[in-house]
Amino acid sequence: MALSLPLRNRLAELTLDAFHDDEARQALRALARFCEADGEGLEAGDLARLGGLGWFCVEAGGRLRLEGAHAAQRAALCRRARAATAMLEDVPSPGDGPTLLLDRAARLADHGLYFEVHELLEPAWIRAEGEERTALQGLIQVAVAFHHAENGNPQGTESLLAEGLVKLRASGHALPLPIGTWVAALDAELAGLRAGRPPGSPVPWPRPTETPWPSS
């Protein structure tokens, strides 16, 4: 089951905030602990952080549970929360500015957080110009393609992957990313989808090089 839009969007916001905000990191870790303990035995700090999300209620005896319609989405919510907390443990590549942004996108993608890749890169795409803008849109479309794959939408996966690859082949050189092997792997994935095969294993996302970004 895919997360409802309110849960998906709020969790994505929390995940992106966790890159630079300790309270957001603690909230994600509290959510992961809720998932591991099935809502029991949580410390006061975790209860307060999770209560602030507006998704939970406290049963008699102090057990925390997801409220109302959120309860049916527990598995999907916990899967993404665990992925986000694991992503935060990755060692970031050195760099700042655009290189840091692209490194964060790779970390998210490598943990299956493709919607979050879209949310991370979209503001940079809006500000960008020329080939840089085209290349960023290509990355976003590839991320959305794999988000569609996660949600069982093969048509959306195929169409967005094809559109993204066109842009990356044309303008990928505008970003400090080693995309040659990656694009070849994505081409193979697209060929499989067009042949009627289901999506394969996720293709590892490229990490940025230290080459300066043209607009930096």
Image (spheres, rainbow, N blue to C red):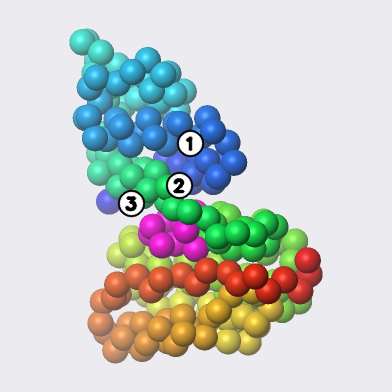
User: Where the C terminus falls, by quadrant?
Assistant: bottom right
- At which x and y percent is residue 53? 45, 28
- Callout 1: SS: helix
Look at 46% across and 70% down and name the residue there.
205
Q: Which numbered disc flags the more N-terminal residue, 2 or 3?
A: 3
Mark 1 neighbour density, 10 Å: few (under 14) some (14–19) many (20 or more): many
Q: Amino acid at mark 3?
A: Ala
Tell me, yes or no, whether the two marked residues, 2 and 1, touch with CB atoms within 8 Å: yes
Q: Is residue 190 above or below residue 67?
A: below
Residue 67: quarter of image: top left
Q: Amino acid at mark 2?
A: Leu
Look at 40% across and 83% down and name the residue there.
185
Q: Is residue 158 left or right of residue 120?
A: left
Q: Is residue 100 above or below residue 15?
A: below
Residue at the spot of label 1 = 25
Mark 2 → mark 3, Cα distance in angstroms: 22 Å
Look at 59% across and 41% down and name the residue there.
20
- At which x and y percent is residue 114? 45, 60
Q: Which numbered disc flags the more N-terminal residue, 1 or 3?
A: 3
Residue at the spot of label 2 = 88
Look at 22% across and 22% down and name the residue there.
40
Please tell me whether residue 87 belongs to the stretch shown in magenta: no
Q: Is residue 38 above or below residue 114?
A: above
Tell me, yes or no, whether the two marked residues, 2 and 3, touch with CB atoms within 8 Å: no
The reply to whether residue 73 is in sight is: no
- The residue range painted magenta reads 106-117
Residue 2, numbered label: 3
Tell me, yes or no, whether the two marked residues, 1 and 3, touch with CB atoms within 8 Å: no
- At which x and y percent is residue 69? 30, 34
Residue 96: quarter of image: bottom right
Mark 1 → mark 3, Cα distance in angstroms: 23 Å
- Callout 2: SS: helix
